[in-house]
Amino acid sequence: MKDDVILVDSDDDNESDILFKIIQDLDINCNVIQTTRGKHFYFKNTNIKSNKIGNQCPLSLTLDYKLGNR
């Protein structure tokens, strides 16, 4: 991944569908890849400084954040 990319990883199929629906409804530009357990969402990173694994986001979804520069 490029240094300015962040991967948001959801390993729960139901939670990844919720996040995907929100992204579609808000017309947010990102790449999405289906995995065997959920989805990977790729965004341009503007302010996240470190990887975060098993992080509960404000939407009550458990997500991993992985930086391209790590």
Image (cartoon, helix red, strand yellow):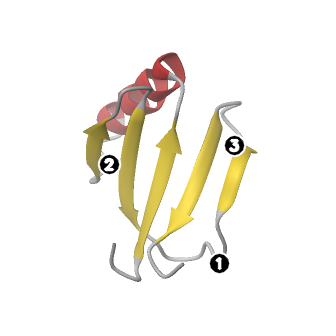
Hey, which residue is sitting farthest front in the picture? 36
**Callout 3 environment at 10 Å: few (<14), some (14 to 19), or many (20+)?**
few
Q: Amino acid at mark 1?
A: Lys
State left or right for residue 21 relative to residue 6. left
Residue 65 point in image, percent of width and height = 58, 57
In this view, 7 is above or below 41: below
Dividing the picture into quadrants, the one containing residue 1 is: bottom left
Q: Earlier in the sequence, mark 1 or mark 2?
A: 2
Q: Earlier in the sequence, mark 2 or mark 3?
A: 2
Residues 45 and 66: in front is 66
Disc 2 element: loop
State left or right for residue 14 relative to residue 36. right
In this view, 17 is above or below 6: above
In this view, 43 is above or below 44: above
**Residue at 38% across, 48% down:** 41
- Position of the C terminus by quadrant: bottom right
Q: Nearer the viewer, mark 1 or mark 2?
A: 1
**Callout 1 environment at 10 Å: few (<14), some (14 to 19), or many (20+)?**
few
**Residue at 33% across, 79% down:** 2
Q: Are marks 3 and 1 in contact (CB under 8 Å)?
A: no
Q: Are marks 1 and 2 in contact (CB under 8 Å)?
A: no
Dividing the picture into quadrants, the one containing residue 58 is: top right
Q: Report the residue marked by disc 2.
A: 28
Residue 33 point in image, percent of width and height = 27, 41
Q: Amino acid at mark 2?
A: Ile
Q: Report the residue marked by disc 3.
A: 57
Q: Report the residue marked by disc 1.
A: 49
Q: Earlier in the sequence, mark 3 or mark 1?
A: 1
